[in-house]
């Protein structure tokens, strides 16, 4: 017996990631759909049972715990197994960030299948998203947030092996510095974010960048300050605080040590400063 529940979008897009529709279906034996194209991304997650997914002259035999992606404009066909028909849920979405998010989660036109090893986390999050949408009890921001949580579960599974590499730790630390250098962050904050101790972080930075985390942070702040000196009319105090230095004297001290010149002297000697835009 076939039971079907479906919802469609009730809202206008207010995000770079938009949910269009989704649902849940217990398929009858040999139930099929297509061939047809979709106008947005569509992700099916198989709760149990089996079936086949056909796309680009390929056939994927799938079962519970696996998901398959349908890309916009691709002609696809899928069919439930005759003996063990699948039960699945799905969500359709699109937006400027959609392809990048999917790529980070290991999905693309060249890799359409996702094997779920989250011990039920991904399944629970996706079913909750569909339930809340069908109940019409959440605004679009909350629903998109739940979709991001689904992607988060997928992302964690795809990147779990990379988390244990020195290169990954270094990249994560560097990204933290890029995004937080303007705040009063310390090496201990960086190590805590990465999930390792300060000693190991120091070792990784020396191997990857030939410089300590502390010197890397200061150097990044100073190079950012140089750019601001050359391209803006911000005063020295503004630049100092904007680049994460706790006071102007500290900024002067580090700047003079690295460039053998004060920020004021650098600005006066900078040809780029004389040629500011809109002057």
Image (tube, grey):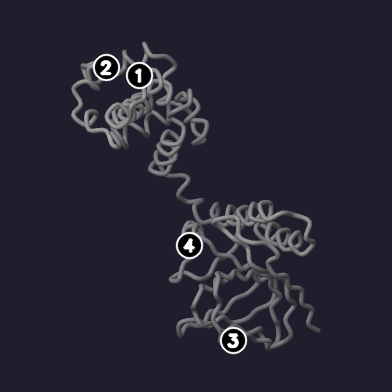
Q: Quadrant of residue 27?
A: bottom right
Distance of label 4 from label 3 (alpha carbons): 23 Å
First in sequence, mark 4 or 3: give its number.
3
Q: Disc 4 marks which residue?
A: 99
First in sequence, mark 1 or 2: give its number.
1
Numbered-mark total: 4
Where, quadrant-wise, is the N terminus in this rendering?
bottom right
Q: Disc 2 marks which residue?
A: 264
- Across and down, in percent, residue 129 comes to 70, 59
| Dot 1 crowding, Cα within 10 Å, few <14, some 14–19, many 20+ | some
Q: Residues at badges 1 and 2 in contact (C-beta under 8 Å)?
A: yes
Local SS, label 4: helix
Whether residue 239 sits left or right of residue 86 in the image: it is left
Residue 74 in the image: above or below residue 122: below
Residue 236's mark? 1
Q: Residues at badges 1 and 4 in contact (C-beta under 8 Å)?
A: no
């Amino acid at each position: 017996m076939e039971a079907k529940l479906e919802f469609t979008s009730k809202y206008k897009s207010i995000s770079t990631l938009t949910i269009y529709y989704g649902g849940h279906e217990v398929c009858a034996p040999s139930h099929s759909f297509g061939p047809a194209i979709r106008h947005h991304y569509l992700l099916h997650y198989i709760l149990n049972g089996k079936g086949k997914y056909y796309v680009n002259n390929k056939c994927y035999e799938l079962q519970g715990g696996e998901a398959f992606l349908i890309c916009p404009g691709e002609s696809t066909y899928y069919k439930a197994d005759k003996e063990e028909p699948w039960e699945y849920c799905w969500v359709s979405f699109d937006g400027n960030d959609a392809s990048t998010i999917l790529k980070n989660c290991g999905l693309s036109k060249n890799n359409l299948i996702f094997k779920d090893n989250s011990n039920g986390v991904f399944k629970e999050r996706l079913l909750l998203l569909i339930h809340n949408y069908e109940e019409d009890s959440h605004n679009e921001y909350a629903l998109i947030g739940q979709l991001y949580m689904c992607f988060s579960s997928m992302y964690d599974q795809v990147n779990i092996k990379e988390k244990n590499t020195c290169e990954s730790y270094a990249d994560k630390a560097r990204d933290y510095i890029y995004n937080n250098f303007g705040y009063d962050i310390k090496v201990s904050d960086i190590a805590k974010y990465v999930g390792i101790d300060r000693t190991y972080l120091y070792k990784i930075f020396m191997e990857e960048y030939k410089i300590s985390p502390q010197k890397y942070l200061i150097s990044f702040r100073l190079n950012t300050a140089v750019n601001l000196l050359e391209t803006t009319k911000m005063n020295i105090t503004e630049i100092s605080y904007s680049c994460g230095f706790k006071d102007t004297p500290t900024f002067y001290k580090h700047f003079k040590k690295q460039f053998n010149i004060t920020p004021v002297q650098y600005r006066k000697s900078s040809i780029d400063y004389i040629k500011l835009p809109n002057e």
